[in-house]
Image: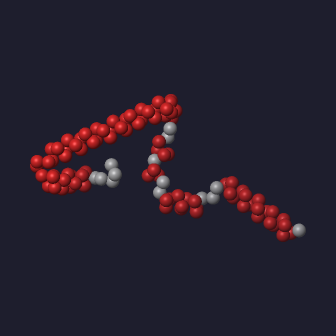
Amino acid sequence: MFGLTFDKIVVIALIAGFLLGPQRLPAAAAALGRMVRTLRKLADDTTGRLREEVGPEFDDIDWTRLDPRRYDPRRIIRDALTLEPAETTERARATAAEHDRAGEA
């Protein structure tokens, strides 16, 4: 959950408790609860609407492939520099062979 551990959440809750005080803390907790319920309902409604629009293919989608945490710019650049696609390699070989033939003639 956003890189927050249980320890960090407890510290944030304690700080919020001290800042808000005993009079405002129950109202703030109730507002936080309403906000979480609203966000959860929004997420469920969005998922339902997406299921309706996409249809049965919705369950076939590989959601892990679309996870934004997978897109680490360092890894993408490293892979681009170290991996050679077969198509690019074949084009380079064909171009080199053409240059070799042109040089022999």
Q: Is residue 14 visible?
A: no
The quadrant holding residue 38 is top left
Please give left or right for residue 92 compared with residue 8 in the image: right
Measured from the top left, where is residue 66 in percent x and y?
A: 48, 46
- The image shows residue 62 at horizontal and vertical percentages of 49, 40
Image check: 41 left or right of 68? left
Name the outermost residue toward the right: 105
Q: Count every numbered label the image shows and give the total.
A: 0
Q: Residue at point 27% right, 42% down?
A: 35
Viewer-proximal residue among 46 and 89? 46
Query: Residue 53: where, in percent of width, then height?
Result: 49, 32
| Quadrant into which the C terminus falls | bottom right
Q: Residue at x 48, y 54 (%)?
A: 71
At a point 63% along the width and 58% down the height, the residue shown is 84
Residue 11 vertical position relative to residue 49 in the rendered view, above or below: below
Left or right, residue 52 beside residue 9: right
Q: How is the image coloured?
A: secondary structure
The residue at 17%/44% (across/down) is 27
- Report the front residue among 85 and 3: 3
The outermost residue toward the bottom is: 103
Task: Answer above or below: position of 80 versus 44.
Answer: below
x, y percent for residue 70: 47, 52
Locate residue 79: give its quadrant: bottom right
Q: Nearer the viewer, residue 20 or 101?
A: 20
On the question of residue 98 being in view, the answer is yes
